Amino acid sequence: MADSLAKQRVAAMKQIAGVMGKAPTPAASFFTVPWVETPVPFSSPPCDPMPAADLDKLVEQNSQQEGVKAELIRAVIAEESGARPCAVSWKGAQGIMQLMPATSEQFGVKNPFDPKQNVEAGTKLLKQLLTKYNNDVSLALAAYNAGEGRVDKDGAVPQIPETQNYVNDIQSKLPKK
């Protein structure tokens, strides 16, 4: 039994090292595993950004189809992935608009790394959030980042620094009214 537990501990440490990019500090007791306090620092995904002409075509098609401003879609893409279709966040979001697996499933996305499917689903999600929050872009963006439940609970952009920065960064890229 001790050998089995030792093997499990080694496997857990390898997984944590893979996520953190370095070996974790050993745990203080047998039943404790290292705590991962902060996300892994961002590093560029191993693919190039999508060519601007191709991205513009996708954005314009989905903007017209869903009635979401193209500038908003572009700003979300720039903030989420830098237009890199292979991007994966430390929380598991995937693709150019960083769809969580549940969102991909909700919108019938078969391959979240396919820019066409990803932008279609991401734009539909933005439309759904804009509708829910009466075209309040701040609330829609906050829900895109932190989830609808948190925005509904707080009734405003949540007091989460990441979400507040996300909303501010995207809104700063949008044309002024």
Image (tube, rainbow, N blue to C red):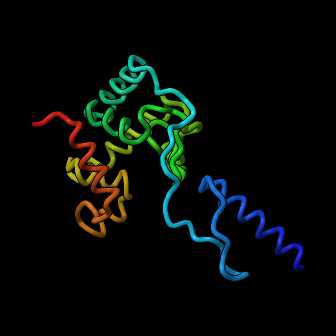
Q: Which x, y percent locates residue 171?
A: 22, 43
| One can see residue 106 in this view | no
- Indicate whether 98 appears above or below 70: below
Image-based side of 75 in relation to 36, left or right: left
- Indicate whether 68 appears above or below 59: below
Residue drawn at 46 percent across, 25 percent down: 50
Q: Residue furthest left?
A: 177
Residue drawn at 63 percent across, 56 percent down: 22
* Quarter of image, res 68: top left
* Quarter of image, res 174: top left
Q: Which x, y percent locates residue 60?
A: 33, 24
Q: Which x, y percent locates residue 18?
A: 66, 54
Q: Quadrant for the C terminus, please.
A: top left
Residue drawn at 26 percent across, 32 percent down: 71
Q: Which x, y percent locates residue 53?
A: 39, 17
Number of disc labels: 0
- Closest to the observer, 94 or 89: 89
Residue drawn at 89 percent across, 74 percent down: 3
| One can see residue 110 in this view | yes
Q: Quadrant for the N terminus, please.
A: bottom right
Q: Residue furthest top?
A: 53
- Indicate whether 47 appears above or below 30: above
- Closest to the observer, 2 or 81: 2
Image-based side of 156 in relation to 45, left or right: left
* Quarter of image, res 86: top right
- Closest to the observer, 23 or 124: 23
Image-based side of 111 in relation to 158, left or right: right
